[in-house]
Amino acid sequence: MKQYEVEILDAKTREKLCFLDKVEPQATIAEIKNLFTKSHPQWYPARQSLRLDPKGKSLKDEDVLQKLPVGTTATFYFRDLGAQISWVTVFLTEYAGPLFIYLLFYFRVPFIYGHKYDFTSSRHTVVHLACICHSFHYVKRLLETSCTNCTYYWGFAAWMAYYINHPLYTPPSYGAQQVKLALAIFVICQLGNFSIHMALRDLRPAGSKTRKIPYPTKNPFTWLFLLVSCPNYTYEVGSWIGFAIMTQCLPVALFSLVGFTQMTIWAKGKHRSYLKEFRDYPPLRMPIIPFLL
């Protein structure tokens, strides 16, 4: 079996940065990046962009050397993508931030509501339920390890928390009945959202990038796949609607509206992608709301 020689040039200066001898034909771009890192530790794999043409597209990590249009001496052009922030860091920042910010208001730390309210607790049950629901949502996100920016999440978390935990907060107009109904909506939708994420995770085997049409499973929460392409977004919106009804708080309602708008855009994009990729895609499905949208 023939082996390859690989040379890596700087995409801007054409300077030879690295020469790799006796590279196996089955080697992937990811493996070549790792070999390159051994001679240039400052460029770890996440910083590297390797391409066949200086101005071409970056090769995918899973691309195999022998399947690329190269000879036995392959030339790749390198570009430094700069320091890369790990997705874990971004994820924790986006979802741990709102959780932490909300709890600051819930515990009424000093300088928020005035000195006499420092570390006091609300007498309204709905305030404590709201804290549990809000915290559960973001803890679930953290545990799922699954994006809108931090300013959006952090800002809305502070805005919602300020009013819900305010010493002068007024409970919902219809009292306990409204709270119980809304809490039920929130819990059901959170369970549904989690179920959809698990179904989507199981749809693609580990290490595979093969796309399949998602279908309902034995879990009743996944049956929404019969009617919409992105039931995870449907359940997500439902959760925030329930939270808005439970707290009867304007910032929560606005957060729900903005979230619904953004998720509708994402759902429509994914729906179009499904229709384009799969000729047998179920015609009854809508992007996010059954029969409507």
Image (cartoon, rainbow, N blue to C red):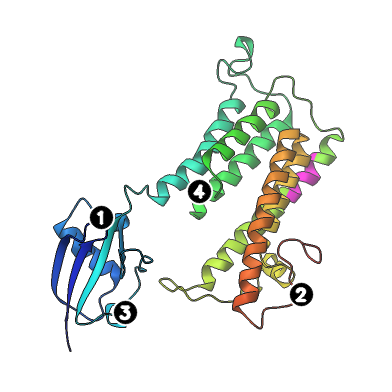
SS type, badge 2: loop
Mark 2 or 1, nearer chain start:
1
Range of residues picked out in magenta: 179-185
Disc 3, disc 1: CB below 8 Å?
no
Image quadrant of residue 267?
bottom right
Mark 2 or 4, nearer chain start:
4
* Amino acid type at mark 1: Tyr
Q: CA distance from mark 2 to mark 3?
A: 40 Å
Counting from the top left corner in percent of width and height, residue 262 is at 66, 51
Q: Quadrant of the N terminus?
A: bottom left
On residue 18, which mark appears? Answer: none
Disc 2, disc 1: CB below 8 Å?
no
Mark 4 or 1, nearer chain start:
1
- Residue lying farthest bottom? 1
In the shown orientation, is residue 238 left or right of residue 80? right
The residue at the point 17 percent across, 60 percent down is: 15
* Amino acid type at mark 3: Leu
